[in-house]
């Protein structure tokens, strides 16, 4: 009997990914094998009883703590683990420890965390450890089945059409790809992406493309005053076995700045048709057509964003100078480390610096133990005005401090690459030492 292979993206090293892509590409949904890990025997029995009502799911084992769960996964090779987040004491009995170990050593097995805690901090910790989804107790059978089947279906759709041996990094193109990313919303990613792309276009006069991967609420078209007739959703709906340059170009829109735009879907519900495979095909084809490709992303480690980050040559991690943003960036950097991205691929950009009550750059660097490569000053009047006019501020207000900051970052991009200075103070201590010192 064929089984679905639920592949856990977080935790697979670059060198090992091709093997797992191939395994997932051949998977067909008929049965999902499941391991239950919970320190409550009553909860384990309840879950087993609920799962007997779904003929597509078979419970193959159970564990009373994280260490047992890790050992059982090695013995039974289940497709999924339902993992209680808090089991016994911290350490080898804890669900987060087990999730992290499973993600590293058995990436073919996906973990769904179950917990009585619904706070966002717990959910982020679960994602950082490698969990694929998160269920809050108590839940009914419908919610349980939908979560399990949704994880399985997303992975099946993502990989079933991927040719064996193909990895997301493979490309015959020469264009450079830059992802603008942050694990927290509201830090100015879209404004930075648009203005940076336009400034690079001004400096080089080469072909520059922005791909808007905020699939539900993308703003790039608005920021560049573009009225797209086609979007990435249209590409997904008309997907071809082998996407070619002519096909892609018919869906890309022009802007007055000279930067071209592949717009996000016009309605949020159309986001569902865009798969990681679509994004993979778009970016690989774009690299053969454009010199610089900028990607505007959402604050998520979903499969679409992970695909973009994998293909990217450089990732600009945007951080605002406040405690909430710093906390989220710390968690995000931990996930990027788990994904085995080289440190020199990820670069910190400080957004809205010099604003009132903002955290200082040197404290951000100490807290995150990483140098800031660029600092975008706060200028609400100029930024809001440019957004309302649909004209990038590097064109409308080139002499302002914020525009000059974009120019400096663009000069790094069009030069020999991003270079980070050595941290002279480098202790990781200071105002954030106790909060962000351990990653």
Image: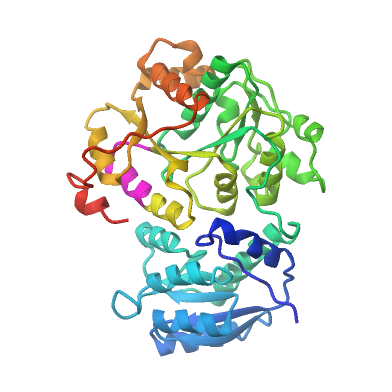
Q: In what quadrant of the picture does the N terminus appear?
A: bottom right
Q: Position of residue 421 (x, y in %)?
A: 33, 34
Is 286 colored magenta in this rendering?
no
Which residue does the image show at 73% across and 76% down from the upper left?
Answer: 30
Residue 400 is situated, as x and y percent measured from the top left of the image, at 38, 13
Does residue 136 show up?
Answer: no
Q: Is residue 187 above or below residue 44?
A: above
In what quadrant of the picture does the C terminus appear?
Answer: bottom left
Q: Measured from the top left, where is residue 141 in percent x and y?
A: 56, 77
Residue at horizontal 47 percent and vertical 45 percent from the top = 299
**Is residue 199 shown left or right of residue 251?**
left
Q: Position of residue 116 (x, y in %)?
A: 38, 71
Q: Which residue is outermost to the left?
A: 430
Q: Is 317 drawn above or below residue 258 in the view shown?
A: below
- Can I make out residue 81 in this image? yes
Residue at 48% in and 23% down: 410
Q: Residue at x 34, y 50 (%)?
A: 330
Left or right side of 63 for 290:
right
The main secondary structure of the magenta stretch is helix
Quarter-of-image position of residue 260: top right
Left or right? Give the position of 49 relative to 332.
right
Looking at the picture, tell me which residue is in the foreground, 290 or 52: 290
Is residue 310 rendered to the left or right of residue 63? right
Magenta residues?
319-330
Q: How many marks?
A: 0
């Amino acid at each position: 009997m064929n089984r679905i292979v639920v592949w856990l993206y977080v935790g697979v090293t670059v060198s090992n990914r091709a093997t797992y892509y191939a395994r997932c590409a051949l998977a067909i949904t008929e049965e999902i094998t499941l391991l239950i890990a919970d320190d409550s025997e009553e909860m384990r029995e309840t879950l087993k009883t609920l799962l007997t009502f779904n003929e597509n799911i078979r419970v193959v084992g159970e564990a009373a703590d994280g260490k047992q769960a890790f050992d059982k996964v090695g013995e039974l090779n289940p497709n999924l683990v339902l993992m209680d987040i808090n089991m016994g004491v911290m350490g080898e009995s804890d669900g987060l420890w087990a999730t992290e170990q499973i993600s590293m050593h058995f990436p073919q097995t996906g973990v769904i965390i179950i917990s009585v805690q619904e706070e966002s901090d717990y959910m982020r910790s679960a994602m950082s450890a490698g969990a694929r989804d998160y269920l809050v107790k108590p839940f009914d059978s419908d919610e349980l089945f939908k979560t399990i089947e949704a994880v399985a279906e997303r992975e099946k759709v993502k990989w079933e059409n991927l040719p064996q041996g193909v990895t997301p990094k493979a490309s015959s193109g020469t264009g450079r790809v830059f992802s603008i990313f942050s694990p927290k919303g509201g830090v100015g990613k879209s404004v930075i992406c648009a203005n940076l792309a336009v400034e690079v276009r001004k400096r080089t006069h080469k072909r520059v493309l922005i791909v808007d991967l905020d699939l539900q609420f993308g703003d790039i078209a608005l920021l560049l005053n573009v009225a797209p007739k086609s979007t990435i959703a249209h590409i997904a709906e008309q997907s071809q076995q082998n996407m070619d340059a002519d096909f892609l170009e018919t869906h890309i829109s022009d802007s007055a700045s000279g930067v071209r735009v592949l717009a996000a879907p016009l309605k949020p519900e159309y986001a569902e048709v865009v798969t990681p495979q679509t994004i993979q095909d778009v970016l690989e084809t774009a690299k053969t057509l454009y010199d610089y490709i900028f990607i505007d992303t959402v604050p998520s480690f979903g499969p679409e964003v992970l695909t973009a980050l994998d293909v990217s040559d450089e990732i600009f991690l945007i951080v605002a100078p406040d405690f909430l943003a710093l906390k989220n960036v710390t968690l995000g950097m931990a996930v990027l480390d788990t994904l085995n991205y080289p440190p020199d691929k990820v670069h910190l950009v400080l957004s809205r610096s010099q604003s009132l009550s903002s955290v200082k750059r040197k404290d951000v660097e100490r807290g995150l133990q990483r140098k800031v490569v660029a600092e975008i000053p706060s200028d609400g009047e100029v930024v809001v005005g440019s957004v309302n006019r649909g004209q990038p501020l590097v064109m409308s207000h080139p002499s302002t401090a914020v525009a000059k900051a974009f120019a400096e970052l663009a000069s790094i991009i069009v030069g020999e690459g991003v270079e980070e200075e050595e941290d002279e103070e480098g202790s990781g201590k200071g105002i954030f030492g106790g909060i962000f010192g351990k990653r």
